[in-house]
Image (cartoon, rainbow, N blue to C red):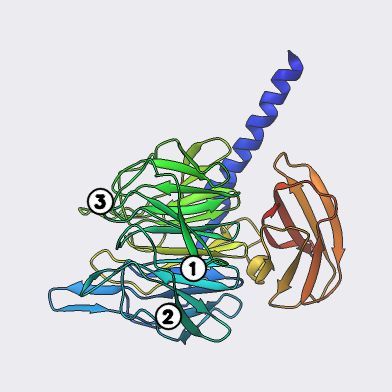
Amino acid sequence: MKLHLLLIVSVLCVFTAEQTRAQDEYTWTQKTSLPAIGRHRACGCSINNRGYIGLGHINNWNASIIYSDWWEYDPGTDTWMQKADFGGGQRYHAVAFSIGNYAYVGTGSDFGGDHDDLWRYNPVTNTWLMVTQVPGGVRSGAVAFTIDGTGYVALGDYQDDCWAYDPVLNSWGARAVPPVSGYSSVAAVENGKAYVGIGESTGWSEFNPVTNSWTVKASFPGASRFGSGCFAYNGWVYVVSGSDWSQEFPDSYAYNPLTNTWVQVSDFPGQGRHYFVCFSIGNRAYGGTGTNGTNFNDFWEYGNLAAGTGETEAKNKAVSFFPNPVVDAAVFHFENALDHEASFSLVDLSGKKVSEEKISPCSDWNFTRGDLAAGNYFYSIVSDGKVISDGKMILQ
C-alpha cells in the first residue's frame, strides 16, 4: 500500500515538474523581423537548421495584395535571406511542411480561387518543382504535418478529409477522416502522433499513423478561436493567440499528450493575432506574421529561459542537432564553437539519468545512441557550470 502511494506521488511529482516546465521556465524573445511587408495567412516550415516563411496577403479598404515571396531564416545569425519565389505564384492560406531535405508548399487561394497543387522546394538549388496535386478537391486554410517521412494534408475551409503523401512514390493515399473540422485549424506532431483541432471550436484530436486512427482528446480550455500559432516543444503542444473574429486572444495553452491535460502558460508578449505562422528548429520554436487588423512582420523565438533563472545569458549560444528523432546517431552543431570542455547528459521522463559523457572543445559533436531504449528523453549540455543548451531528444 505504501509502495503504491509512493509511486503515485512520484508520478504526480513528475507531472507537476513538467507542468512547471511548460508554464514557467521558457519565454519568448523577439528576433529580427521578416524583411518584407507584414502579412497574414502566410505559411512556413523548417528544413534541418533553417526556417522558411512566405506567401500570404494583405487586404483592407484600399489594397488587396497576394505574395509569392519565400524567405529563409538562419537562427545562428538571426538573419533572413530572400529565396526564389514560390513556383505556384501568388498564394495565401496555403500549407507548408517538410520531408527530409525538402519543403512542400501548396493549396491555398489567389484571386482566381482555391487550388490543389503541391510544389517541392530544394534549398540547395533554390528551385521549385511541381509534384502530384493534393486529392480531395481544391482547398485553403488546411493543416499539414509530417510523421516519419510521410507528409499529411487535412481539413480546410470546406473539407473534413485527410491525405498522406509518399515523397518516394510521389503519390497520395486517403487516411481516416478526422473527428474535428473547422476554419483555419492548427496541427503539430509530438512523439510520432499528430494533434489537430481548434478551428472556430475547442475540439482536439490525436492521429496515430500506425493504426490510421483518430482519438478525441481533452477539449481546448480557452475560448473558441481560429488561426492560432501551434508547435510542439519539449514534449508539449502549444497553442498561441488566435481570434474569434470579434477579438484577438493573447493567451497561450500547452497540452501534455502523456496526461491528456492542458495548462495555461504565459501570454504571447507580442500583439494578439490570428494566422500566426509557427515552426521549430532544433530545440527552439519560432513564430511570426499574422494580423489583428494590422499586418505583422515581427518574428519571435520560444525556448529561452525566463528572466530570473540565472541561465539566460549562458543559453544564448545557438545549438542545434540533427536528426531528431534519432535512429543511431545525431550531430550537435555549436554556432559559437565550444572553447571549453562541456558535459552532455540525458534523462528519461522519470528524471533518471541514462547517459553522460564529456564533449571536448569543438564546433560539431557526434552523439551515439548505443543501447538506449526507444522513447522520449531530455538532454542538457553544461559548460563552465552553465547550461548552454537543453531540450527534448526522441530515440526511435
Q: Crowding near pointer 2: few (<14 within 10 Å), some, many (20+)?
A: many
Circle 1 packing at 10 Å, graded few (<14), some (14-19), many (20+), is: many
Can residue 384 be seen here? The reply is no
Residue located beneath label 3 in the image? 244
Between the residue at mark 1 and the residue at mark 2, the CA separation in whole angstroms equals 11 Å
| Residue found 45% across the figure and 63% down from its top | 278
Left or right: residue 227 compared with residue 350: left
- Which residue type does callout 1 highlight? Cys
Given residues 173 and 374, the one toward you in this image is 173
Q: Earlier in the sequence, mark 3 or mark 1?
A: 1
Q: Position of residue 185 (x, y in %)?
A: 35, 53
Q: Nearer the viewer, mark 3 or mark 1?
A: 1
Counting labels gives 3
Q: Position of residue 347 (x, y in %)?
A: 75, 48
User: In this figure, which residue is indicated by the disc labeled 1?
Assistant: 45
Secondary structure of the residue carrying numbered label 3: loop
Residue 194 in the figure: left or right of residue 289: right
Q: Amino acid at mark 3?
A: Asp
Residue 70, numbered circle = 2
Q: Image point 57% across, 60% down: which residue?
A: 303
Camera-side residue: 165 or 75?
165
Q: Which element type, helix, strand or loop, lies under badge 2?
A: strand
Give the numbered dot on residue 116: none
Q: In 3D space, how far apart are the residues under numbered discs 3 and 1 (Cα atoms)?
A: 25 Å
Give the spatial CA distance, label 2 vs label 3. Answer: 29 Å
Residue 255, position as x, y percentages in the image: 49, 43
